Amino acid sequence: MTPRRREYLAEGLGTGLLLMVVVGSGAMVSGLGGSPSTALFAHAVVVGAGIAAIIVAVGPVSGAHLNPVVTLVEWRLGGLEGREVVGYVGAQLTGAVVGVAVGNLMFGLPVVAVSPTDRIGAGTVVAEVAATFGLVLVVFGAVRAGRASIVPFAVGAWVAAAIVATSSTGFANPAVTIAREFTDSYTGIAPVSALWFLFGEAVGAGFGLLAVRVLHPHHPPPAGELLVPHDPEGE
C-alpha cells in the first residue's frame, strides 16, 4: 500500500471509530436511565477520551484530522494540496457513515435509519459556529505554538467541553453531522437540522482560520504534521 493510501485508510478508520464511539456511547447512556444532564456529561467524557486515543493511534500516519474542517483549514494554510483534500474528506465521510452503522448494529438498531431528531434553532447554529471556531483555534494554535504533542488531549478536552457547554452539543465536524443523520438514536440529527449545522460549522471554520492567521502568523508546519508529527513519505 502506498503512503498516501495509508493516510486515507487511517483517516477512514479513525473517523469510523470516532462515530462508533459517538453513537455507541449515546445509546448506552440514554439506556441507563438517570437525568439527561448526567447522560450528557457521561457521553461527553467518553467521546473526549475516545477522540484523544484515536488521534494518538492514527496521528503518526495521517495527522489524524478526522474532520473535513481541519483538513480544509490546513489546506488553506498551505499544508495540503487540493487532491489530498479530496482523498482525506472522502475517507472521513465514508468512515463516518460506516462507524454510525457499526454503532447502530451494536445496540440492535437499524443499520441505517434517517433520524427524525430536530435540532434546528438560532441558538444551535450559533453554538456550532462557536464549537467549530474553538476546535480550529485549539488544533492550529497548539501546532503553531510548537506543542503538537498535546493536541490529542487538547482536542479531547475541547470536544468534551463543547458537548456539555453548547446548545448543539458541539458537533463541530461536517463528517459527524452528515453521518449522524443515519441513526435514529440519542445522537441522531434530522437532515434539515444537519444543513443548518453544516452552515454553522463552515462559518466557525472561517472565523477560526482568521483567528489562527492573526494570532499565529508564522509559516505553517510541513504537510501532514498537523496533529501528531509523521513522515509524509510513510518511511
Image (cartoon, grey):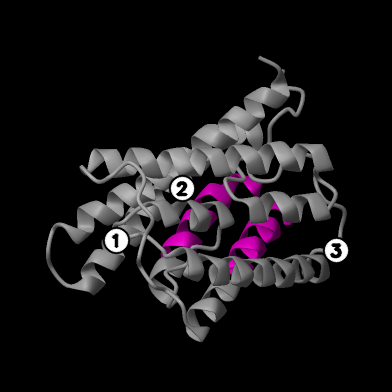
Tell me if 43 is positioned left or right of 137 in this view.
left
Q: Of discs 3 and 2, which sits in the foreground?
A: 2
The residue located at (44%, 56%) in the rendering is: 181
Q: Do the residues labelled 3 and 2 touch (CB within 8 Å)?
A: no
Under tag 2, what secondary structure?
helix
The residue located at (50%, 33%) in the rendering is: 13
Tell me if 231 is positioned left or right of 44 in this view.
right
Q: Mark 3 points at which residue?
A: 217
Amino acid type at circle 1 is Tyr
Tell me if 109 is positioned left or right of 212 in this view.
left
Q: Main secondary structure of the magenta part?
A: helix
Q: Do the residues labelled 2 and 1 touch (CB within 8 Å)?
A: no
Span highlighted in magenta in the image: 132-160
Query: Which sits earlier in the primary sequence, circle 2 or circle 1?
Result: 2
Q: Does the magenta stretch include residue 96?
A: no
Residue 207: image location, x then y, percent:
72, 73
Per the model, the C-alpha gap separating discs 3 and 2 is: 28 Å
Quadrant containing the N terminus is: top right
The residue located at (29%, 51%) in the rendering is: 25
Quadrant containing the C terminus is: top right
Query: Which sits earlier in the primary sequence, circle 3 or circle 2?
Result: 2
The residue located at (75%, 71%) in the rendering is: 211
Q: Residues within 10 Å of mark 1 (few under 14, many from 20)?
A: some
- The relative height of residue 50 versus residue 187 in the rendered view (above or below) is above
Q: Mark 2 points at which residue?
A: 51
Q: Which mark is residue 186?
A: 1
Q: Is residue 222 visible?
A: no
Per the model, the C-alpha gap separating discs 1 and 3 is: 41 Å
Q: Is residue 156 magenta?
A: yes
Front residue of 82/220: it is 82
Front residue of 122/137: it is 122
Tell me if 59 is positioned left or right of 20 in this view.
right
